Image (cartoon, grey):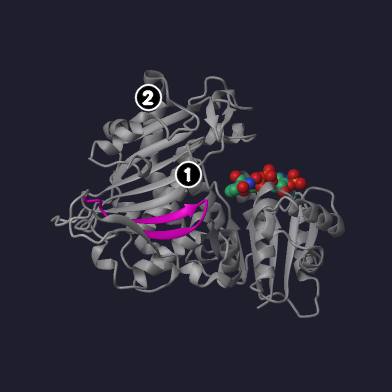
């Protein structure tokens, strides 16, 4: 199956740091379909040759083993082309069309993937112009990067613009967490095995905790971040997508709409926020100066391009529930933040303790840990007999359920997987517009309550960089008799 992939924003940070390295890995692993071409498009005045050498230089920043050798890069670069276009100029879309239509030895590509790695404010205009040059035929797919909107209204506006030109089955909305191996393995564990499903419910599970922690601050992106904040940047999309993967009912088929229908039901079942529950169940914080990895770091308000009195949250912890028979009463805690103690993204499923103790020592409940960062992996924490005597206390052991290690040669990175799925036209790992809009609908009362509350409370609670956020986030979980993983 031949393909043409057009990378709008081909000179951007996302393109050279994530997308091109992922395409290179797919090429190196022999997974990129034969007969493919990659066209980078941006305003920079490059020829194809200068773009390739620019990219080669950028690849030197790619981590160790993922760096291409010169010969390998030269073979990959053979697929890469460049077109200078200004996406605000309707005439430039004609050029893209002509480039794609130019006769080639093996005939026109079976599939055309248009990857929009530019600022989303260009999306409506790009879609409209793509429609005008008829680049929306049935073999065309459009890949949309986050952020898809700033609130429900702007998300709906982008979706309307996309849908006026492309059908829903042509729209591939990226959430890169869905591309992670551990998330794939979670699906395999839940729906490919009979073992866990009977336990996957309120009778056996005490609570579920999703942590997406970053150690980095906002770096040079202070102006973007200050308009966004942690709730929009991480909770509305990534954390809620992970929650749906955990809480969804088994889909009837392994097909995109069967899966996305179930995820949507979870989003509809989330306990709605009220003005009162935002105060009790949502904690927002903002980092102050502190120490990370032994180095002093500035506070959020002292970062470049951040207003000195900013009320933007760099941390959120919240408690919610999925109001249905399976999950009734089980708290789901979501937490994300910048400048936290460790760069850890994980989901912890905390099971209930054994109902009756016959062994001495602490009755430590089992937990399933789905690790997303810094490394992907799945672990089941159990208690086992270490010593010999019957009076000996049990010791915690950890069962490695990382199936990917058994198939090491098939290990695939997140963006690599998502790009290959988009080329293959499989939507299972992409977000449908109704899911995305329902997620906005659910967080909107929080955004509105914070806007009202800013003048009363003075905004987010301060926390010291390099810690796990405001103490109130621990109290939120402790209130139910639980603790975050680092406090257990
Ligand atoms: P960036 O570094 O600012 O790159 C933007 C790209 O768009 C550049 O290639 C730029 O090239 C091109 N561009 C801008 N206006 C254009 C126009 N009128 N015509 C043609 N090309 C134009 O931004 P980025 O970090 O790559 O991010 C791109 C999008 O992905 C953003 O929405 C961002 O929020 C999202 N995203 C980024 C990351 C990441 O890790 N960077 C992760 C997730 C999502 P020229 O200036 O040469 O035209």
From the image, tell me which residue sits under label 2: 453
Label 1 packing within 10 angstroms: few (<14), some (14-19), many (20+): many
Q: Position of residue 467 (x, y in %)?
A: 45, 33
Label 1 CB, ligand 1: below 8 Å? no
Which residue is under mark 1? 234
Residue at 56% x, 67% y: name it.
Answer: 411
- 357 vs 261, left or right, is left
Q: Is residue 72 magenta?
A: no
- Secondary structure of residue under mark 2: helix
Residue 397 in the image: state x and y as whole percent. 34, 58
User: In whole angstroms, how far apart are the C-alphas of marks 2 and 1?
Assistant: 21 Å
What span is colored magenta in the figure? 363-380
- Look at 45% across and 52% down and name the residue there: 436
> Splitting the image into 4 quarters, where does residue 25 fall?
bottom right
- Where 300 falls versus 316 (above or below)? above
Q: 104 or 201, which is in the foreground?
A: 201
Question: How many neighbours does mark 2 have within 10 angstroms: few (below 14), some (14-19), or many (20 or more)?
Answer: some
Element class at badge 1: helix
Asked if the stretch drawn in magenta spans residue 375, the answer is yes
**Is residue 18 placed above or below 218 in the rendered structure?**
below
The x, y position of residue 351, in whole percent, is: 26, 55
Q: Where on the picture, by quarter, is residue 27? A: bottom right
> Residues at badges 2 and 1 in contact (C-beta under 8 Å)?
no
The number of discs equals 2
- Name the quadrant of the N terminus: bottom right
Q: Is residue 105 above or below residue 272?
A: below
Q: Quadrant of the C terminus?
A: top left
Side of 224 relative to 152 (left or right):
right
Of callouts 2 and 1, the N-terminal one: 1
Extreme residue toward the bottom, this view: 106
Residue 223, percent from left and from top:
61, 32
């Amino acid at each position: 199956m031949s393909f043409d992939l057009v990378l709008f924003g081909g000179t951007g940070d996302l393109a050279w740091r994530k997308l091109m390295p992922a395409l290179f890995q797919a090429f190196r692993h022999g997974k990129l379909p034969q007969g493919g071409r990659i066209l980078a498009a941006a305003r920079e005045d490059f020829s194809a040759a200068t773009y390739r050498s620019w990219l080669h230089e950028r690849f030197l920043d790619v981590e160790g083993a993922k760096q291409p050798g010169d010969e390998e890069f030269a073979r990959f670069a053979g697929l890469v082309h460049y077109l200078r276009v200004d996406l605000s100029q309707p005439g430039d879309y004609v050029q893209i069309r002509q480039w794609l239509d130019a006769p080639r030895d093996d005939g026109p590509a079976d599939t055309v993937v248009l990857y929009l790695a530019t600022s989303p404010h260009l999306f409506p205009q790009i879609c409209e112009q793509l429609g005008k040059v008829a680049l929306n035929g049935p073999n065309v797919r459009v890949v949309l990067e986050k952020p898809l909107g700033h609130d429900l209204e702007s998300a709906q506006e982008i979706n309307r613009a996309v849908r006026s030109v492309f059908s829903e089955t042509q729209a591939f909305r990226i959430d890169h967490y869905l591309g992670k191996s551990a998330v794939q393995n979670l699906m395999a564990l839940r729906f490919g095995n009979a073992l866990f499903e009977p336990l996957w419910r309120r009778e056996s599970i005490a609570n579920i905790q999703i942590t997406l922690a970053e150690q980095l601050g906002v770096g040079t992106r202070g102006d973007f971040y200050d308009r966004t904040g942690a709730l929009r940047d991480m909770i509305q999309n990534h954390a809620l997508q992970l929650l749906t993967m955990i809480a969804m009912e088994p889909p009837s088929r392994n097909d995109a709409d069967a899966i996305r229908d179930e995820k949507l039901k979870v989003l509809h079942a989330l306990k709605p926020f009220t003005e009162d529950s935002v105060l009790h169940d949502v904690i927002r914080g903002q980092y102050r100066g502190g120490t990370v990895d032994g180095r002093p770091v500035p506070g959020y308000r002292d970062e470049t391009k951040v207003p000195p009195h900013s009320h933007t949250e760099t941390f959120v912890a919240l408690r919610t529930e999925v109001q249905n028979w399976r999950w009734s009463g089980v708290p789901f805690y979501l937490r994300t933040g910048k400048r936290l103690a460790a760069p850890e993204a994980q989901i912890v499923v905390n099971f209930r303790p054994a109902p009756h103790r016959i062994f001495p020592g602490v009755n430590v409940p089992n937990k399933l840990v789905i690790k997303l960062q810094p490394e992907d992996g799945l672990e089941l924490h159990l208690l086992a007999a270490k010593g010999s005597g019957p009076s000996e206390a049990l010791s915690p052991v950890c069962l490695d359920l990382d199936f990917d290690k058994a198939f090491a040669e098939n290990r695939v990175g997140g963006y690599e997987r998502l790009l290959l799925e988009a080329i293959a036209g499989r939507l299972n790992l992409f977000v449908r517009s109704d899911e995305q809009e329902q997620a906005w609908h659910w967080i909107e009362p929080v955004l509105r309550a914070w806007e009202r509350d800013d003048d009363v409370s003075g905004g987010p609670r301060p926390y010291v960089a390099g810690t796990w956020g405001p103490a109130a986030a621990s109290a939120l979980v402790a209130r139910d008799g639980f603790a975050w993983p680092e406090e257990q």
